[in-house]
Image (spheres, rainbow, N blue to C red):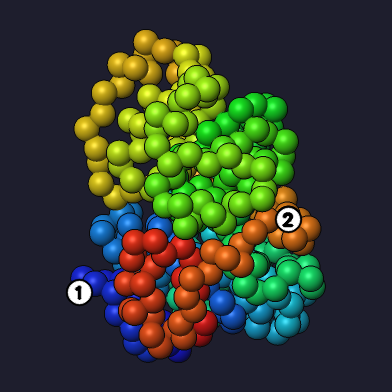
Amino acid sequence: MLALSFGEGGPALGEVPDPRPGPGEAVVRVRLAGVCATDLEILKGYMGFRGVLGHEFVGVVEGPAGHPLRGRRVVGEINCGCGACALCRGGLERHCPRRTVLGILGRDGAFAERLALPDRNLHEVPGGVADEAAVFCEPLAACFEPLEQRPELARRRVLVLGDGRLGLLQAQVLREAGAEAAVLGRHPAKLALLDGLGIPVFTGPAEAARGGRWPAVVEATGTAGGFGLALSLVAPRGLLVLKSTVAGAAALNLAPAVIDEIEVLGSRCGPFAPALAALASGRIRTAPMVHARFPLARGIEALSRAGERGTLKVLLAP
Ligand SMILES: [Zn+2]
Ligand SMILES: [Zn+2]
């Protein structure tokens, strides 16, 4: 099958063997995949990953024969735990030390005609949700994770830093949950996606801080420098949620976090069920984020397009 892989020579398009599902795993034929900032970080060395790229997808279960979801449209959670360790048994497969992660760690990903995932990772997509929306389920689920970790965020003033894909989704999820969410970004064209949703947008830190520092800040800039900016905007005793995963490290002065007694909370992948429900409700704007769509055969071009300034989501169709 055709796949877009990352190896020693960089990203490459070519034929690879079909995935071989392990016990309790299904083969999914990919209908649509999304290029994520994490994929672009992998190209710079993040996680040291080698293999088929991609972890955001919607597809159809193809096998094995007799699979209860065969022929059904699914999305899939990307972390695959061992199922046996204490973390897995406690429901924390995402933190299993022996986990694989689709297209990120030890498991071939979604920029291919087919992928394999454990049955328990799959979620059927409701009929009313188009592929173009369902493909956002994985990043949208990640935006529900801060609310799982700190339900009180739904009742707070929250500033989201970053007007990329994640920031725009995060602000919408917080707002839907009841939070007083605002976004600080740098690109008026991207921020315009939130027009009419009742989410204030700021284009500079001074403007964002005009009403005082924020009791909660979600850092979703996708840049190593975002953490320092976030620290300067969170109020004493406030909560700072970190969502960016970047390959590079930044020198950082943590003294402000100590002085202001800031609580720092890392936040990664999230629950799929509320994300699917939000997509089915039609209340999360995803369509304007799709800036380009490429066939998998032009996958290299798709990666460079996704990395261009101002680009939100690029989709790949096998
Ligand atoms: Zn992603
Ligand atoms: Zn485990």
**Residue that mark 1 sits on:** 9
Q: Amino acid at mark 2?
A: Arg
Residue 22 can be seen in this image? no
* Residue 97 placement: quadrant: top left
User: Between 85 and 196, which is closer to the camera in this rendering?
Assistant: 196
The residue labelled by disc 2 is 283
In the rendered view, tell whether residue 141 sits above or below residue 137: above
Element assignment for label 1: loop
Q: Residue 171, percent across and down? A: 59, 44
Question: Total number of numbered labels?
Answer: 2
Query: Residue 179, position in %: x, y?
Result: 67, 34
Q: Quadrant of residue 72?
A: bottom right
Residue plotted at (61% across, 52% down): 195
Of marks 2 and 1, the one in the foreground? 2
Q: Which residue does the image show at 65% across and 67% down from the upper left? A: 134
Q: Is residue 183 visible?
A: yes
Q: Position of residue 248 (x, y in %)?
A: 25, 46
Give whichever of 219, 84 is nearer the camera. Answer: 219
Image side of residue 263 versus residue 206, left or right: right
Q: Nearer the viewer, residue 40 or 94?
A: 40
Res 80 → quadrant: bottom right
